[in-house]
Image: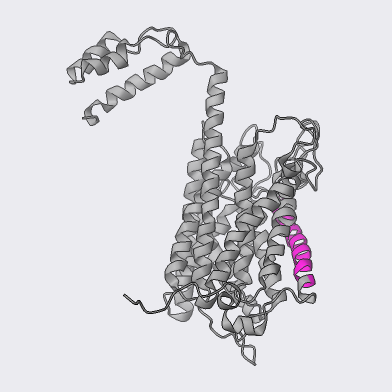
Amino acid sequence: FLAPRMPLFAALARRVATQISTSTMSSWCTADDTSALSASGLAQSAIDVLCKAAGPERRGLAVTEVDIALIQGSQDISYMLISGFFVFFMQAGFAMLCAGSVRSKNVMNILIKNVLDACIGCMAYFCFGYAISYGTKSSTSFSGEFLGEGWFFLAKGDHDDSFTDWHVFFFQWAFTAAAATITSGAMAERTAFQAYIAYSFILSGFVYPVVVHWIWDTAGWLCNWKTDADGNADLLNDVGMHDFAGSGVVHMTGGIAGLMGAAIVGPRTGRFDASGRPMAMPGHNAALVVLGTFILWVGWYGFNPGSVLAITGAAAVDVARCAVTTTLAAAAGGIGSMILNYSLYKVWDLVAVCNGCLAGLVSITAGAYVLSPWSAILAGFVGSVVLWGSSKLLLKLKIDDPLEAFPVHGACGAWGVIAVGLFADQKLLGSYMGAASVDAQENYGALLGGGGKLLGNQILGIVIITLWVGATIGGLFFTLKMAGMLRASAEEEAAGLDESKHGGSAYNMEPSKV
């Protein structure tokens, strides 16, 4: 019924939009429109609704620029909230990935840690994290280059009621939860429960928010939108550091924290033999690994396209482009891991392909906005090589990372940051930073002729994140280890943390009595 009438309806819709903006006509349709609708067989009552109803000025539909701005603002807020829902749903992906990658006797332990990352992280971010990330003392003040200075417990420093950025808090908290959850996989199957709770609170409430402020807040010293108190551009080396959705901010922070935890807590019992050779300890359920991978992939469409922070006007095109670059990098990472593992071991390794997809996603997160499709594919493919090489390096160092959390998130996160410094497109980076013209963006990808300033800032960001997270989280884990609070006992580890700490197994293996 609708198909043959769609062109006519589309034409009417365009005329409606025009008349809304001009508010000069008393009817939606011309006489020819009315005749055409009648000839199409449309009921007269429907034609009356479409064409004979009062015009916009009589129905109160005159639209001003202010009205349009309010509508667009509402759409952008809705888009950020929906993107935040997608990012938070990644917690389910992490949970399934972690559950499938550990042995069955530790499933409940790893799952409760994933759940508590969301719960404890929410309280920590509410109390301290958001304030450190973006807070100012008052509506008119300007925060410092290294820390936010207000809005603790979401209270404005000047006690006014003008705070409306609830959608920003929610969106940023979802990212915080993702960063915190990364570490659980690196320390799986042997870490004391209370130690993980302490880690989750400190990373969500302090360590991660400091990195966010440095790189994403307009007052932060590394931000590529940095301004001074008067609103003038004040960028490090005229370009700042570009980490669009968090290869460094989110994934490196979680990955470095996981590396410190895995190194300090020590390997699982039996992971390396007496000669230091690694012994296989495969996860118990590949189906959960695949399910978790696909959930994370879908969630990344909130992570990367959602970081455009708007969907109206020209931003819609940017959102779509980010979705495409994200998809291409994920696919390239999975294919790269498949080729690499079969070339070396003659095995079509399912888990390796899943980790390769995640490596590609992490590798494109910093550059989803500024990389062209070809460079997004390259970033994802190189990410699979970085994943393989860093995994082998950890085994050489006898560091046990059951989920390869550091290789996927830490090492590939660093590569994603570097990829921006190498391949950032002049036009796309200029558009993101608000350059007056394409030629006005003088600093962009080094391999594309943009000089070395951006690449230098990217490398500086990697070093700073590594030192900051390594020192703070490493210091926390070392202190807990000295206090005897970091690692579960040998007996608890052997029995499985589910039985020893959580009241039983995740699976009921008793035979049915029916």
Looking at the image, residue 341 sits to the left or right of residue 14; the answer is right
* Vertical order, 240 against 36 (above or below): below
Q: Residue 227, percent across and down?
A: 76, 37
Q: Residue at x 53, y 63 (%)?
A: 95
Q: Outermost residue toward the bottom?
A: 274
Q: Residue at x 63, y 40 (%)?
A: 168
* Vertical order, 499 against 362 (above or below): below
Q: Residue 238, percent across and down?
A: 75, 42
**Colour approach in the figure:** one colour
Q: Quadrant of the N terminus?
A: top left
Looking at the image, residue 358 sits to the left or right of residue 188; the answer is left
**346 or 197, nearer to the observer:** 197
Visible in this render: residue 111?
Answer: yes
* Vertical order, 279 against 361 (above or below): below
Q: Which portion, as a residue range, is magenta?
A: 451-479
**213 or 340, nearer to the observer:** 213
Q: Residue at x 52, y 47 (%)?
A: 85
Q: Residue 7, percent across and down?
A: 28, 26
Q: Quadrant of the C terminus?
A: bottom left
